Image (cartoon, grey):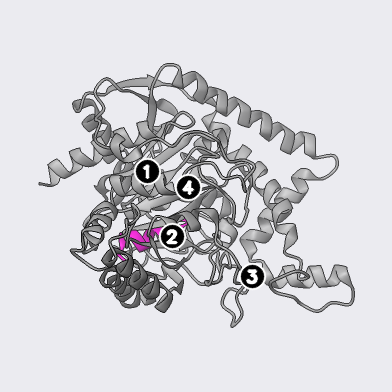
Amino acid sequence: MATWPFGGVVETAERVGRGEVSAEEVARASLSAIEAENGELGAYVAVAGEAMLREARELDRRRARGEALGPLAGVPVGIKDALCTRGLPTTCASRVLGAGTARPWSPPYDATVVARLRAAGALVAGKCNMDEFAMGSSTETGAYGPARHPLDRARTAGGSSGGSAVSVAAAMTPAALGSDTGGSIRQPASFTGVVGVKPTYGRVSRYGLVAFASSLDQVGPFASDVRGAARVLGAIAGHDALDSTSLDAPVDDYEAACGRGVEGLRVGVPEEYFPAELAAEVAGPVRAALASLERAGARLCPIKLPFTRHAVAAYYIIAPAEASSNLARFDGVRYGLREPGRDLASLYGATRARGFGLEVRRRIMIGTYALSAGYYDAYYLKAQKVRTLIRRDFEAAFREVDLIAAPTAPTVAFRLGEKLDDPLTMYLNDVFTLPASLAGIAALSVPAGRAGGEAPLPVGLQLMAPPLGEATLFRAAGACEAAARAVAS
């Protein structure tokens, strides 16, 4: 895997702040890496280019004047194409918003998380590839084509935030932003061997994130190391009056938590996440990572999360139901693609038929059916009740343990096209990430090693903590990372 030449997020920001390297030099290195690799990897769908260089030069001028720079000074960050960016298109990889056309939709404002990155001194490198409207687990459903795995171009980088993961894994940037509705940050982080964080629901503002499923969507960072992810999360977290679901709670010092160790920490290991069918190539590295936590002073505790087995069924009713409502705004009238029609109904139909891809149309139809008269109680209401039971599972577990550890994904990165024509098999790829999303708790994926044949692929360890327990996650993730580095050295 490629290595970012200036160290991780923290090292890059500190070197720029000290004047050891200019922000412009860092920006040019990022743009050069994107230019060299993106044609094959498909990580970026739009590149900031000269705008990024202008931001970097202004940062260098501020440093020369002796002004204090932010915690992400000069750090290039890729932005998932579902987040609004002033001056760059935002298409959600969908033709309905002009993806792949000469006139993609360009928002007049930055999402709150993008504005906070800029305020912290980060440099926006461009927009990262994704599954259309974040609906997918392989970055194959969007209009721009797939994002490819840096270690094996025939394999997926995961999804739906695959482009963001590739940006970090291929050292185009040391960090990127993604969104996670049912695993869309954690699964690609696992596949590509980087750190990916899904914060507590409400910990990070959703203002300016194009909605998929509003009660599940969360924005979070990818980074090449744990401290880098902690610093980026610290910069974007916090209350936002523009998001009614945003939590008004203090933001912990996540970066400091990375070095606190895990002595005395109780780590729950749920039996439901280690079924007999779990691939040995995944189970081995995950078990080894758990053993490293135990050697570092944590106590492993067997636990049960019995309603985990219902998470896939509940999610694929709730999320499509919310999507069918959210995507109704793409009608060909206000913005984006507009196909002619005899009347309003035919205009709607023609626009959506051409603008939405197969997977998006499938989920809209599932969601509309689940919300329709006569089926709401049988499907949507029942799924919400199951969601409550899943959340109660976690609440009971967290009365006994401090965090929960499990595999992030049931397999290593699979081949492109392998699951695209089998939606159920694709959906099952998120079996371990969906429960935390439904419960709204904090979760992250940290590299647990590599496995599988002559060309081993990354495997991720998923760590889950109670709401607003991100600092505990970073404690454990930091310990895992330190143990892995000790073995490598």
Q: CA distance from mark 2 to mark 3?
A: 25 Å
Give the label, 2 or 3, closer to the camera.
Answer: 2
Say above or below: 59 vs 272: below
Give the residue type that dot 3 points to. Answer: Leu
Give the residue type that dot 4 points to. Answer: Asn
Q: CA distance from mark 1 to mark 2?
A: 25 Å
If you read the primary sequence from the N terminus, does the residue marked by circle 2 or circle 3 appear first? 3
Give the residue type that dot 2 points to. Answer: Arg
How far across and down, in percent of the image, does residue 483 sit?
19, 38
If you read the primary sequence from the N terminus, does the residue marked by circle 4 or circle 3 appear first? 3
Q: Is residue 349 left or right of residue 180?
A: right
Where is mark 2, residue-wise?
118
Q: CA distance from mark 4 to mark 1?
A: 15 Å
Mark 3 packing: few (<14 Cα in 10 Å), some, or many (20+)? many
If you read the primary sequence from the N terminus, does the residue marked by circle 4 or circle 1 appear first? 4
Q: Nearer the viewer, residue 435 or 275?
A: 435
Give the label, 4 or 1, closer to the camera.
Answer: 1
How far across and down, in percent of the image, does residue 473 sit?
36, 34
Q: CA distance from mark 3 to mark 1?
A: 31 Å
Inspect the magenta stretch and tell me whether residue 169 lies in it: yes
Inspect the magenta stretch and tell me whether residue 88 lies in it: no
The dot on residue 445 is: 1
Say above or below: 193 vs 105: above
Is residue 210 visible in this depiction of the protein?
A: yes
Asked which quadrant contains residue 74, the reply is bottom left
Where is mark 3, residue-wise?
97
If you read the primary sequence from the N terminus, does the residue marked by circle 3 or circle 1 appear first? 3
Give the label, 4 or 2, closer to the camera.
Answer: 2
- Residue furthest to the top in view is 400
Q: CA distance from mark 4 to mark 3?
A: 28 Å
In magenta, the rendered stretch is 159-172
